[in-house]
Structure formats: C-alpha cells, structure tokens
Amino acid sequence: MKSWLALLQREFLEHRGAFLYAPAAIVVALIVAVVLGFFTGQFRAGGAVVEPARLPLYDAIYLGAVKVWASYLMITLFFYFADAFSADRKNNAILFWKSMPQSDLKVLGSKLLAGATIFPLIIVGWMLVTSALGFVAALLVSIRVPEIASPDLFAALGSWVQITFAAVAYIALNVLWYAPLFAWVGLLSTVFRGWSIPLSAAVPAVLIMLESVVTYSGGEFRSSLLDFLSWRLSGFYEDGRAVEQLMSPGGIDGTQMISDMVAGINLLGLVGGLVFVAAALFLASEYRRRRIEA
Amino acid sequence: MTGAIVEARGLSKSYGRTKVLHGLDFTIPAGRVYGLVGHNGAGKTTTLNALLGLIPAHGQLSVLGLDPFAHRARLMRDVAFISDVASLPRFLKVGELFDLVDGIHPNFSRAKANGFLDGTDIRQDAKIKNLSKGMIAQLHLAVVLAIEATLLVLDEPTLGLDITYRKRFYKRLIEDYMTEERTVLITTHQVDEIESLFTDIMFIRDGRLVLDMPMEKVGATYRQLIVEEPKQAEAMALKPVYAETRFGQSVMIFEGVPEERLTPLGKVSTPSLSDLFVALMQRSTGAGVAA
C-alpha cells in the first residue's frame, strides 16, 4: 500500500502541471472575466440572449462547467497517457526507477490508477471551485441584468447537490468508457513515445482503409471497425437530456440523470473495454521490462 | 547454484547479429569488492545490466539465488545500483526524491541519505534539474548508500566528481557501508585510484573475461620488471606477457615467473592494475611483446 501511494504521488508530482496548475490558470482567467464583465457591464449583452423566465442561470452555469471540465479531463488524460507510459525514458530515468523494487507492471499500473483516480478527483475539485464561482457569477449577472432574478441560495444549494452528484457519476463513467482509448495511446507511447498521438489515429485509419478495400463489393465503402469506433467515441449520454432537465419545471434531478447515463452504457462494451485495458497494460509492461534505452 | 552472490555460467548476450558477451563464467562470493575493468564497449555495462535483470541474456545466471530478469523487482530489494549515466528523475526536488524512495523501497533509510548529504551543497528543496552534474552524482550515491543492500553495483559511480569527493565517497563506502555480508561490484576507468579497495579483479575484453582473480593472487602471479639494459635478451627469454619502453627504461610484465628468477635482471615490483590491464589487453591482441 505504501509503495502504491508513493507511486501515485510520483505521478502527481510529474504531471501536476496539466491537472493542477493549468486548471488553476483557467479558473483565475474565469474570475478575471467575471469581475471584468461585472465592472464593464458586458453581462447585459449576454442577458439579451438568455431567456430569464425559463433558465435557472446558476444551474446552467454549473452544468456548462461540468461539461467543460469533463471534456478538459478527457483530453488531458489522453495526453497524459500519451506521455506517462514513456516518461520514465526521459533523461535515462528508467534506470533509476528500475533500481527500485517495483515491477514494470506495477509501475505502469500506478500510472493507469493515477489517471483513473487522483487526476479525475483533482478536476472534480476544480469543478467544485467553479461551482462556487458560478454562483458568484450568477449573482453578479443578476445585479447587472435586472431581467434575471438573483439566484436563491437554498435553491442553488439544492441544484448544487443534484448536479454534483450527477457530475461525479458522469466523470467516473466517462473515465471508464474511454479507458480503452487511454490504454491504446499508452501502449503506443510505451513503444513509440512521442509518435503515439498521431499513431493512435493513424493505425485505426489504416486498418479501416484496409478493411474497406478488402470487403468492398460495389456501392459504398463499409467498415465495421469504423462503425465500432464511431459508436464507441460517441459516448453514452446525450447532452440534450441534461438541457431537457434544466428547462423542465422540476429542475435538475441527479438520480434521473445518473439513471439515464447508466441506461446509455453498453455493459458488454464497458467490460470489453476494460479487458482491452488490462491486455494493453500487460503488453506495455512486458515491452517495458525488456527496454532500458532512453 | 551455490551460496554465491552472483554465479554466471555461459553468460551470453547478442544485439541482433552482434554478439556482445561470449559465454562468461564467473562467481562472486559474499563480502568482496570486485572491480570489473574493460575498454569502452568491452561488455561491462551489458554484463551489469544482465546481472541486474535489466536485459534478458542467455546462459545460467543467478544473483542472490534468483534469476535476475525473471525477478528484477524482488531482487532490487537487496540490490542497489548506479548506472553509468545520470538517471535521477529531473522533475523532483531532493526532498521529494527521498520521500518517494522512502515509500517505494522498503530498505531505504532517509536518515542515512541525509547523513550522506552532510558536507555537500545539496539542499532538500533544490530541484534535481538545477543541480550540477557532480551534485547529481553525489545525490545518487547518497540514495544508493542509504539502501540496506546485500549487493551494490556501481557502474562508473564517480564519473564527473572531483577528487575530494571521490576519495570521501570511497572512504565511506569501505568504512561505513562495507560489511562481511555485503558485496560491491564496481566498474571504473579510474582503476589506479581505487585498486587498493578491490579484493578481486575482472578484466573484460570484447565480451570475454581475460582475468578473474583475487588481488592477493594477482600480486603473486604477475610481476613487473624494469630491466637493466644489458639483460634485456635474458629477460625476453622468460616470455613476458608485455614489454614496452617507458621513459627510456625497458619495462616487462611476467605471468607466473618466480620472483627469484627476475630479481637478477632488474627491479621487480607488482604491476599497477592499469599497467596489468594494458598488458593483458595487448596480449589478447597478440601485440604484447611487440615493443
């Protein structure tokens, strides 16, 4: 347990920039934008766009923030795995890490675990910071735009609980659903280092092209691999469902949102994806076991 | 396999069609300080990498009773090593490095590591990437010496260090670190500086061991003779393994020739390791007595 915690700490120290400092800069930029918006009166222009009678502003801001942070997390995790699985080879550091009594499988497993736990948790932390900032922003907007009612603290608190509950589930399910993509780029990174990002797209593209050519029998080009990847990458939850709830008289219902998410998940696809993750992790560790070159 | 720390039989390694190690046979018992000496590209680092389980190799190889490649992680609990290139992770601060190693390595003592940094300019809050090459080497040595290991493998450990620190490091290695249970394997090009530390010496050339001998036996087997001018032909008749002219003097190295046969021919001494190394390397090429 102690060694796992140390390995997770190592991942945090090495990659905190993308998950701690960059989001901090984004949040600071948001604060500046809100303050500037308030003092320059720029909220009024936005006030003309929204429909104050129907849209609970705080809920909309927080839901939007959840979507942005979840997207940020997925993109950043993709780049994290593209780097982390080969990061030890920078400056010959792999020789140092291999002098430690930890197997290659465990070291790579700790990277995977960090990507599935501490980094999403940090982003959830930023999401919560943004939720507080969102309340202040809604308050300031209501001051500047009289057509918009100021947010009620207790109503906002109720929405906060519902949205946070659903957001945590949304982020967790996203991490699980897209884990095969992360494992794929991680596996490529172990072998090809910086080329993993273009290869992660190029390899499927070549396979799709080959499949299309081989199976072509007149008419349209078809590829079952392309269909599968399109389905996989389209996710499991339609954003429109959240907007529907936002606009409904009852407001956001976190439990209903989670039910919608779970209903949208293909269980076989999820489990199959995790099996792929395990296989990719094992292959990457076996490759790493045989390599010491920087 | 016996209770030896390291036992290798027919250890071979190839990279593609290039054979780097040609069936090495050697045994390293406990409580010894072994020197592994060879030219660049002779196979020293490959040998060490095989011992440390960093690369797969052919032949029989046992380190502390384990197959190193199959059980590297288990082996590293009792083996500490420094590679011949700077390898400390640059993104960490010194204190963070100690924290991590403390968490990852069950046999690491942070107090000892701090002790080894005493008297250096390395601060706990310093970023490793900002340290000089010499300071990084000092820090790595502090980490390695703070690990309770049965086998310590040092591949050019003092490369880039000044003479003061080199002497201090080897003094502490012998006085504070070395025990009867511990074994140290060192490769270095600065053999003359530490030859008094070695209990055993191995010379490697083109992936083959050309010498594997305890130091006391080296002294009894090899002799250096500064030959008096008129007795050169007589000395050559004793078949030196190496002969050269050094500062106008004729110097020869003999293997297995009794001292009493050499004494009448000039001044007899034990060759330094570097002289012996040059002699045996030259002999391997067949150029030993060309001078």
Image: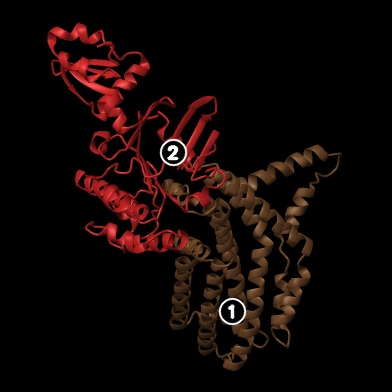
Chain colours: A brown, B red
Question: What residue is at 72 percent from the left and 81 percent from the top?
Answer: A255
- Left or right of B235 on screen, residue B32: right
Q: In this picture, is B242 found above or below B272?
A: above
Quarter occupied by residue A128: bottom right
Residue A49 shows in this picture: no
Residue A282 in picture, x, y percent from top left: 63, 50
Residue B68 in picture, x, y percent from top left: 52, 43
Q: Which residue is mark 2?
A: B48
Residue B19 shows in this picture: yes
What secondary structure is marked by label 1? helix
Residue B223 in picture, x, y percent from top left: 24, 22
Which residue type carries mark 1?
A: Ile
Question: What residue is at 34 percent from the left and 50 percent from the top?
Answer: B179
The label on residue A61 is 1
Distance from the alpha carbon under mark 2 to that under mark 1 = 60 Å
Residue B5 in picture, x, y percent from top left: 45, 43
